[in-house]
Image (spheres, helix red, strand yellow):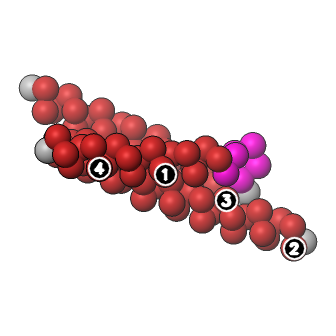
Amino acid sequence: MLEIIGWASSCLLLATLIKQVYKQWQEGTSEGVSKWLFIGQFFVSLGFTVYSIGTGNLVFIVTNSALAVNAAIGIYIWYRTERASSAS
C-alpha cells in the first residue's frame, strides 16, 4: 500500500510540473517564471537522485530523475523564450 501511495504521489507531482513546462513551451513565454526555480530544482533533484540510489528506493530514484529531466527542459525553454523575446 505504501508503494502505491508513493507512485501515485510521484505521478501527481510530475504531472503538475510537466503541465507548467508544457504551458511555457506552448505559450512561448517564461514570463513570471524565474530561471533559478529550474536551476535549483535541477541540482536538488540530482542530489536527491544520488541519495535515492544510495538508499535503493525505486520510487524516489524514478521521481527525482524525472524531476531533474523536467527541470533541464524548463531551463532550456526559459532560455529559448528569453532569447526569442530579446531578439524581437
Residue at image position (51%, 60%) is: 72
Q: Residue placed farthest to the left in the image?
A: 1
Residue bearing the label numbered 3: 78
Is residue 8 shown left or right of residue 43? left
The residue that disc 1 covers is 42
N-term mark: 1 or 4: 1
Relative to residue 80, is residue 68 drawn left or right? left
Q: Is residue 72 above or below residue 43?
A: below
- The image quadrant where one finds the N terminus is top left
Which span of residues is magenta-colored? 30-35
Q: Is residue 31 magenta?
A: yes
Disc number placed over residue 50 in the picture, else none: 4
Look at label 1 and name its amino acid: Phe
Q: Separation of disc 1 and disc 4 at Cα?
A: 13 Å
Taking depth in this image into account, of 21 and 42 the one nearest to the observer is 42
Q: Earlier in the sequence, mark 3 or mark 2?
A: 3
What distance separates the C-alpha of mark 3 from that of mark 4?
26 Å
The foreground one among 33 and 15 is 33
Q: Determine the main secondary structure of the stretch shown in magenta.
A: loop
Mark 1 to mark 3 CA distance (whole Å): 13 Å
Indicate which label's residue lies in the foreground, 1 or 4.
Answer: 4
**Precedes in sequence: disc 1 or disc 3:** 1
Nearest to N terminus: mark 2 or mark 1: 1
> Label 4 sits on what residue type?
Val
Residue 87, which numbered label?
2
Tag 3: amino acid: Trp
State the separation of the CA atoms marked 3 and 2. 14 Å
In contact (CB < 8 Å): disc 3 and disc 2 = no
